[in-house]
Amino acid sequence: MIVEEIVFEVECNLEFTKKNENFFKYLGRFMNRTAQTNLHSLWDQGLITIRLQRDFQSNTSLYYDYIYELMNNQSLIDNDDDNIEQWIKENIHFVCSQIYLDEQNVTMNSSVNFTLGEIYYQRSIPVIEQRLAQGGHRLGVLLNFLARTRPHKPSDKKEKICLGTIALIVVLSVECLLAIIVGTILWIRFRNKSSATYSLSFPSTKA
């Protein structure tokens, strides 16, 4: 059993590499449309566009709410939030088991134009939405991890505020001191002037 799994994984990886090199070369028609498309365009936007038109009145906000709810209610596989290697294996598995199989579950050939329709759509759209929900959740986990582990630079904001406050205190103190000195000088001069005036107004008399 283990040998069979290893052989399948090796074959699948080789097939994945080979097919992805020619991803745009798989041409054909989808849902009886006259315009030709390719598998890359189909999985990138074509299938989601039909889903939006059919079930969400082409309203991306409604579709976002649906995917968000799906993400919150989705049970994650083997608790693999931070296992990037597992994510890659899942992608390879979906490529081998979903993308390149036609509606008769026969592997497509890039030299023959495909004709796909409702069966392919119904089989593929749950996979796309599952991956969207998983991708959103895993992106959140990754961003939270980066936020937790990033080095924190010691902030000099408080230091700058303290220096600014000290400078303000010094300036105000100097101004207050000058005001006191000037006020004292003026008061002394005023007192001396008043004393002189009083002496002139009441001269001393001799008996």
Image (cartoon, rainbow, N blue to C red):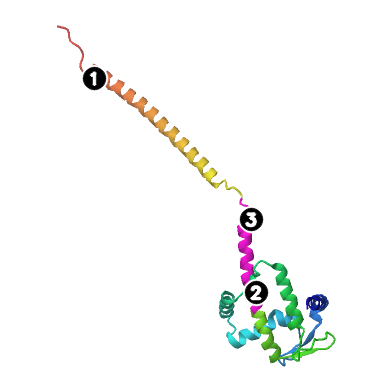
Q: Is residue 139 above or below residue 107?
A: above
- Where residue 89 sits, quadrant-wise, is bottom right
For marks 2 and 3, the one nearer the N-term is 2
Residue occupying image coordinates x 80% and y 83% = 26
Where residue 7 sits, quadrant-wise, is bottom right
Dots 1, 3 in contact, CB < 8 A: no
Choose mark 1 or mark 3, whichever is in front.
3
- In magenta, the rendered stretch is 130-152
Inspect the image, locate mark 2, and give the three-letter code of the amino acid beneath it.
Ile
Q: Specify the quadrant of the image occupied by residue 149.
A: bottom right
Which residue does the numbered mark 3 point to in the structure image?
150
Q: Which mark is residue 77?
A: 2
Q: Quadrant of the C terminus?
A: top left
Frontmost residue, 192 versus 110? 110
Q: Earlier along the polypeptide chain: callout 2 or callout 1?
A: 2
The three-letter code of the residue at mark 3 reads Arg
Labelled disc at residue 198: 1
Residue type at mark 1: give it.
Answer: Tyr
* Residue at 79 percent of width and 89 percent of height: 106
Magenta stretch: residue 10 in it? no
